[in-house]
Amino acid sequence: MERDSRPDTTDLREQIVALLPRLRRFCMALARDADKGDDLCQAAIERALSRSEQFQTGTRLDSWMYRIAQNIHIDQARRLQTRGVEIDVDEAYGLRGEDGLQLVEGRSDLERAQTAMAALPEEQRVLMALVVLDGMSYRDAATTLDIPIGTVMSRIARARRAIDKAVNGETVQ
Amino acid sequence: MTGNLTRDERIAAFIDGALEGSELAAFEAELETDSELAGELERLMANDTLLREAFGAPMQVVADDALLARMGLLPDKVEKPVDLDAHRRSARVANDNPPFRTRWALPVGGAIAASLTLAILFIGPGGNSFDRALENTPSGQFAAMDNGSRLTPLLTFVASDGSYCREFSIAREAAAGGAGIACRRSGSWQVEALERGATELADPNEIALASGVEDATLDAVYDRLGASDPFDAKREARLIQQDWSPSKNNLSAVE
């Protein structure tokens, strides 16, 4: 077993362990599947520990980790795209049962919410994960993703509208 | 900061606490009179709650060892000292050195005498006695050095740069001695760490100190070197036999 010969990462490890529940949730939302989310999470942690010197003490670890996870996720999605693989929304979060149709009919609210989230465009989903799931302010989300705050606001508004449509149907007003 | 917002953006910004000052006041005033807006706000907030619930599973999970291992977060430090100590113990049991004078009186003296002879036989010409001892002596056995100290390799591992390294102890009759770590680079053994007791017993003419050699605890040096787990006796014997060349018989430095 090879060991990390870089500066001691014990502190960073402990902080990541403390962050782990939120990080896993973020990755799950991003990857649209709990298992794939854990794969993503593991990859992000590995990259973070191998680049521990790039983390500036005193800055937000969550933002740094989320950014790493998102970068890995984008790379993976790009590779999948070039291979022509499309992700089926119904397969997202492992929701599809033996009888796909029946499942759609009887899908619980929670499953509907997960599916709705999975159906969002990448750039909206990541913001919903940061702001709605994780409770980040618009400002922090903008910093984390390095986008203008106005963009955060408009994407969140569109995402909420889409989620509402998916969860409550078109007719609700 | 909110400028000209759409209706949806204003609702979202209100939910997320991003409306401030007069904008916030205006929105709250609208809520009082506009029941449709109030209803929509309520529905969107319920959606948020539903989403948080739908993605709540990871928040309920306690990080046990299985999860930490899956995430690559189990510190190898926890395993390392256990492994090292076990190896050191077994090496020290094999080389349970009583003082020289009484050694030969012990029933096991013959076996130890044999291993001493063996060590001396292995030491060939070339290099100094420190190099030769580390080069040829299996862990747990000892070799006599030219200055009269005994060197006992305790364990063997590979560093992250691919160098083979050994922890050893140096002792002399009455002196306590101490332990050290040396790595084989370009055919000779460079000391990476040496405890004070060992320094006193080492021959300064013989020992090549790596730059920045540490007086720190050996564990810190293991960390710095990126040490592998210690080799088992068979693998170590193979390396000694093959003059520490990993290429022979397709032995790889990192298994």
Image (cartoon, rainbow, N blue to C red):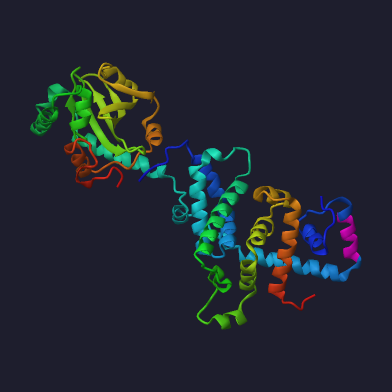
Q: Horizontal placement of B191 versus A70: left or right?
A: left
> Hey, which quadrant is residue A95 in on the image?
bottom right
Name the magenta segment's main secondary structure.
helix
Residue B98 visible in rendering: no
Residue B74 location, x and y as percent?
A: 44, 48
> What's the magenta region?
B24-32
> Hey, which quadrant is residue A55 in on the image?
top right
Tell me what residue is drawn at x 24 percent, y 41 percent: B246
Tell me what residue is drawn at x 69 percent, y 59 percent: A132
Closer to the camera in the image, B87 or B137: B137
> Hey, which quadrant is residue A101 in on the image?
bottom right
- Measured along the vertical axis of the image, is residue A88 above or below residue B79? below
- Measured along the vertical axis of the image, is residue B137 above or below residue B202? below
Tell me what residue is drawn at x 90 percent, y 58 percent: B26
Quick check: is B26 in the magenta stretch?
yes
- Measured along the vertical axis of the image, is residue B41 above or below residue B240? below
* Label total for image: 0
Residue B183 location, x and y as percent?
A: 30, 31
Closer to the camera in the image, A1 or A162: A162
Quarter occupied by the C terminus of chain A: bottom right
Closer to the camera in the image, B234 or B177: B234
Quick check: is B9 in the magenta stretch?
no
Residue A64 visible in rendering: yes
Residue B43 location, x and y as percent?
A: 76, 69
